[in-house]
Image: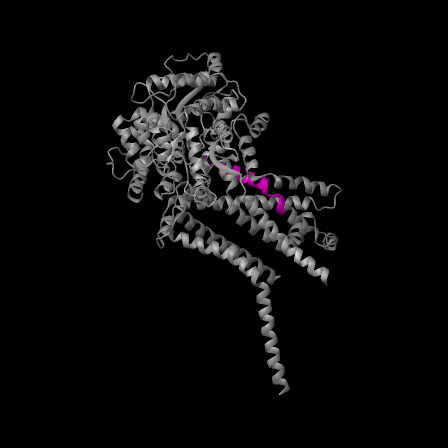
Amino acid sequence: MKATALRVGFALTLPVALVLGGCAAGDGGSEEITLTVQTDSYALPGFQLVADQFEADHPGVTVEFQVLTPDQQSTTNLQTLTSADAPDIASAPFNTTVFTEMLAADQFVPLDDVWEEADLEARYGQSLADAIRPGGQQVGVLFSKVLYGIAWYNKAMFEEVGIEVPEDHQIGTMDNLAEMVAKLRAGGYQPLSIGGSSNYHLTWILDNLLATSATADELTNYVTSFDPDVDVTASYTDAAFTDALERIKEMYDSNTFQDGVLGMDQDAGLALFAAGQAGMMMGHNQTPAGVANKESDVDMGFLFLPPINTDVTLPNFYAGNLLEIPKNAQHPDLAKEFLVLLMSDEMQIAAIEATGGAFPGVAVDESAIATAPDSVRELLEFESEYGNVAGWASLVPAKLGTTDPLIQKLLLGETTAEEIGVELDALLEEIRTDG
Amino acid sequence: MTAVSRTVSGGAGMQVRVRLVLLAALPALLLLLVVFAYPIVQTVQLSLSEWRGFGPMEWTGLDNYADVLSSDAFWDALRNTVVFALGATICIVAAALLLAVAATRGQRFDPAFRAIWFLPAIVPGTAAAVFWSISVQPQSGVVNAVLGFLGLGNGHAWLASPETALWVIVGVAAWTSTAFPFLLLAGAIDRVPAEVYEAARIDGAGDAQQFWYFTIPLIRPVLTMVVALQLIWNFNAFTLVWAMTKGGPAGSTTILPVLLYQEGFKNGDFGTAAAMGVISSALLIALGAVTLRGSASRAAGE
């Protein structure tokens, strides 16, 4: 009986002792902190450099990454960021529902002190700084700029099939494009590879062509008219918009894209190009890094699609790669320090080489870009000389800018450009009314 | 007097027993409440509100239902869902039944046969989707390569065509999902007494007649359950469709769960998504009730 009582007493005491012991250890000076940072696979190598430096500067702090897909960034991440287990640094791109909903509900920590300490207003430049702080709220930092709407081509393949590459990188006309396509197909290759089923790649082409179809005023209105305070002066049924849609249809009908394009996502399209089966691929400034990740040694150059009304086609500029601190973050002060370090010249420059060509979010010394692959460096030089143009879908709300399913219907003859315009006008009105 | 006392004491005993039963069932009832009732009530409440993913809900009455029922996208997705669920269920059950019959003929290799046919069930759905979507690509895909070898052409873009994309996914669903019903049906066939077949053979029944007049009626309870489960699971399928086509091309493979996901997570309209979920659940409950009632009345008739 006495032994039983002893056992019961021991059994009751042990858990209590363990709990108290655990508390005592937690109160000690050797507390371990984990800083959780969201990122994507393209940016990860650059972020890893920052994490290594940060951990060295902050003994006891471990940086842990949550690597998100573009789909996660624009969908389910909202639930993660508003949960009690929110990361310390969020990756909510500017043009996603996640960002707009979090902003509207005041769920981001203001980053005025980060902007000030990292001198971001001056280093971004006034227009970019204004573009990424809606209503003047500094809740995010832009860690990397992206240029897209670029037709990368395989230099060796072009030489093999006898395609002469224009020195100004402009394909120029649809006839020139048709000639390239014909030569590639005659050589047994697929022409222009895209992710037709990715739900964003067709819209990227629309962005690229829209900027050559619309006037500057029309384009400005298209990218700002979702704001109810801005008058709608450009309708989606206007020729400026429908001509760009019709051009994609023309490209599809003339077999410019790879066979089975609507059944291939962006990764499958990239694999086709990296494997040397397609001569061209629509992509962005980090596409060469993506090709290299597939252990491909394709030597790449870049071209631009034929413009519709302008003389040249320019790359689209995307300034949506924002990082924020959710209000539910466990370590907001450390997160701010991480962001300041990430935005330092040293880390912004180091990321160029680490990522294989990610462009810095802030202006850095031009010589820094020398660490990027040749193809990316040439692209940046082109952009410095000729400029870039805003991408419509990267600035309007996702509900309006996700036009891939509509473009797929257009390509399959199930709808017309005019009908898509009517549908987008109705969506625009809904967004302006309901928010 | 004695009889009255016995009645009172019997009633009290019954009350105690009822209390005991309720007490014993309490944890299970609480679990049911937390796991099933609460989410259902929440979903219905959400379907009657506007909610952007967090924060308070705003009551909107039946507006979400009106929006859903007047939307072409919903009816298109419902049609795709019915086609997919029926197509996949028919393929899966037919394949499982044929394999089960083949694997229960008392042959030496039956156990190995069962193990081999169960292998696709352990492949993760996403991996199967990626494998098959690469396999059916024109030129480079293995399916087209085989067809090309047979002289049937290697340029078929199965996933790029609205006419074929959904059927490719039905085929992949059949490949990944046949194993489990196969095992259930094989088990049911195993339990049919051998004497039944011996008697049938003596009466001159061939293999086909034995299958239709003896095997099918005797495994009907399991078969009905398998059909009902497959209909429900395929009605709620998401992984294969999302991983292979994301609902495209041109919405031709957008089934209800895909539309619900897009509405909720892509557009941030969780109220509308919840209304779709409630309608979809109501349809499934009706389907389940019809299936079970049909099965019960047939069993009673026999």
Magenta stretch encompasses residue A123: no
Q: Quadrant of the C terminus of chain A?
A: top left
Magenta stretch encompasses residue B170: yes
- Vertical placement of residue A3 versus A433, above or below: below
Q: Quadrant of the N terminus of chain A?
A: bottom right
Q: Which residue is the extreme one toward the bottom?
A: B1
Q: How is the image coloured?
A: one colour
The number of callouts visible is 0
State the residue at coordinates (59%, 46%).
B93
Of A202 and B234, nearer the camera is: A202
- Is residue B118 visible in the rendered image? The answer is yes
- Vertical placement of residue A201 versus B69, above or below: above
- Is residue B248 visible in the rendered image? The answer is no
Of A87 and A155, nearer the camera is: A87
State the residue at coordinates (29%, 41%).
A432
Give x and y (percent) for residue B105: 72, 46
Give x and y (percent) for residue A327: 41, 42
Relative horizontal placement of residue B178, taking residue B160 as reference (left or right): right
Relative horizontal placement of residue B156, taking residue B223 as reference (left or right): left
Could you tell me what secondary structure mostly forms the magenta stretch? helix
State the residue at coordinates (25%, 28%).
A217
- Vertical placement of residue A299 versus A77, above or below: above
Q: Say which quarter of the image contains residue A385.
A: top left
Which residue range is magenta in the image? B161-181
Give x and y (percent) for residue B224: 59, 53
Of A120 and B78, nearer the camera is: A120
Give x and y (percent) for residue B282: 46, 54
